[in-house]
Image (cartoon, rainbow, N blue to C red):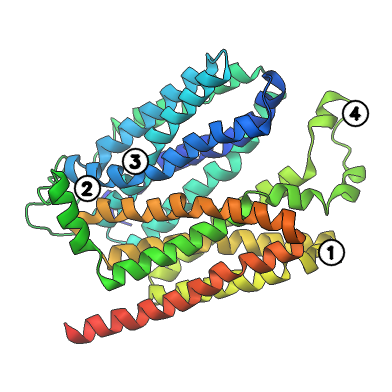
Amino acid sequence: MRENDRAIVAFTGLSHAVVHTYELSIPILVLVWLTEFPVTTAILGPVVAVGYGLFGAGALPGGVLADRYGPKWLVVGCLLGMGGSFLLLSLAPNVPTIALALAVWGLAASVYHPAGLSLISTGVHDRGTGFAYHGMAGNAGIALGPLLTALLLLAFDWRLVAGLLAIPAVLAVAVAFTAEFDATAAVSTDGGAGNDGTETDGAPTSISAFLTDSRALFTAGFTLALAVVAMNGLFYRGTLTFLPDVLSGYLPSVTEYVRLFEPGSAMAQEFDLASYVYTGLLVVGIGGQFAGGKLTDRVPVTTGLAGVFAGLAVVSVLFVPAAEAGVGPLLAISAVLGFLLFAIQPLYQATIAEVSPPGDRGLSYGYTYLANFGVGAAGAAVSGFLLSAVGESGTFLGLALFPLVGVALAVGLARRLRTDATAA
């Protein structure tokens, strides 16, 4: 990669890891709050949902701001906001303060993906490789964030742990102030951003301009691409939200072989093998991100999307039978699931770049993550309902419909792109 490419990927990769470190540390802290405060899941669930909801809802205005003011400093603001939210969390005396801190986190974190991905799409020449390394860094945060939080909670009070988790954001901000790169090196746009990415003249500056840009953005190809992203989000949230609980139902016999702690000790009681298998699945996703990013440089993105979606549908159908066959098949199917879940991300990110103009790239990724995190959040409700109504087998069969629809959408998008290319 070129020097400018490396600088952008290093900056966005570190920031991406920090975002997901916080995102996945919250469920670990929830377990503590349920015992620390007189609340039930019925109360704490909506409290946490506020933060996650804003994480998705803020992506669209975040994309507009990225186009208007430049992605680099928007990412810096994101990091500062997330670090501040966890400092506030460390001082929280009650649940309302926790709700406020999580809302601040959600608003701050929501701008990252449209800003970071916009920066890669306009500044990195080897776009597929850039998306791959960026995704791998995010997966490192996804996997290591909850693991780090869980380990710290074994030794420290949760408030101190929340305060310590602010440190990664501070370090990332320090790196940002030393990073130098050309934010638009990979594209040439009329009135585009300068080398520091401070402003893009084509960005919407009013509601009417925003609506005009949005109408222009929503071509048939972009609309189909957003539907693809939504299918991914629904399957992603639907699968991962309750996966630790599902895994725990097939792993209890394995725990008798675990001798890491003294039997009956506090640490032994805290140890949950399903959580570590879940973390391992997320770690495998790092390889999936890399493979998916490389694939975008070698095959048409729609071909890659259709292939990965087909693989996810097969894995979803086979997951419960494999789990019932024993620990070995369960670990194998979990590894394949983790690999494919994250291999698709660079593919749809590159797809959005292909069907959107560079001057509105932040806006396009804003819509992308509104679909991925916002619409996709409904996947958790779908899987929760299915688990209670039809059990684990029925749930995974039902969830397989999302990637199957994704295959059809990817094929339709390929035809649309061919038609547009012929017309041009």
User: Which residue is painted at 68% across and 29% down in the image?
Assistant: 40
Q: Amino acid at mark 4?
A: Glu
User: Whole-percent x and y of residue 332?
Assistant: 73, 63
User: Which residue is painted at 78% across and 39% down in the image?
Assistant: 272
User: Whole-percent x and y of residue 1?
Assistant: 33, 57
User: Whole-percent x and y of residue 172?
Assistant: 39, 32
C-alpha span from label 4 to label 2: 54 Å
For mark 3, what is the residue? 111
C-alpha span from label 2 to label 1: 50 Å
C-alpha span from label 3 to label 2: 17 Å
Left or right: residue 316 compared with residue 137: right
User: Which residue is painted at 53% across and 26% down in the image?
Assistant: 165
Q: Earlier in the sequence, mark 2 or mark 1?
A: 2
User: Which residue is painted at 76% across and 59% down in the image?
Assistant: 391
For mark 1, what is the residue? 324
Label 4 Cα crowd, 10 Å radius (few <14 / some 14-19 / many 20+) = few
Is residue 290 visible from the viewing direction of this image? no
C-alpha span from label 4 to label 3: 45 Å
Label 1 Cα crowd, 10 Å radius (few <14 / some 14-19 / many 20+) = few
Q: Earlier in the sequence, mark 4 or mark 2?
A: 2
Rendered image: mark on residue 262: 4
Which mark is nearer the camera, 2 or 1? 1
Left or right: residue 207 compared with residue 17: left
Looking at the rendered structure, the secondary structure element under dot 1 is: helix
Is residue 87 visible from the viewing direction of this image? yes
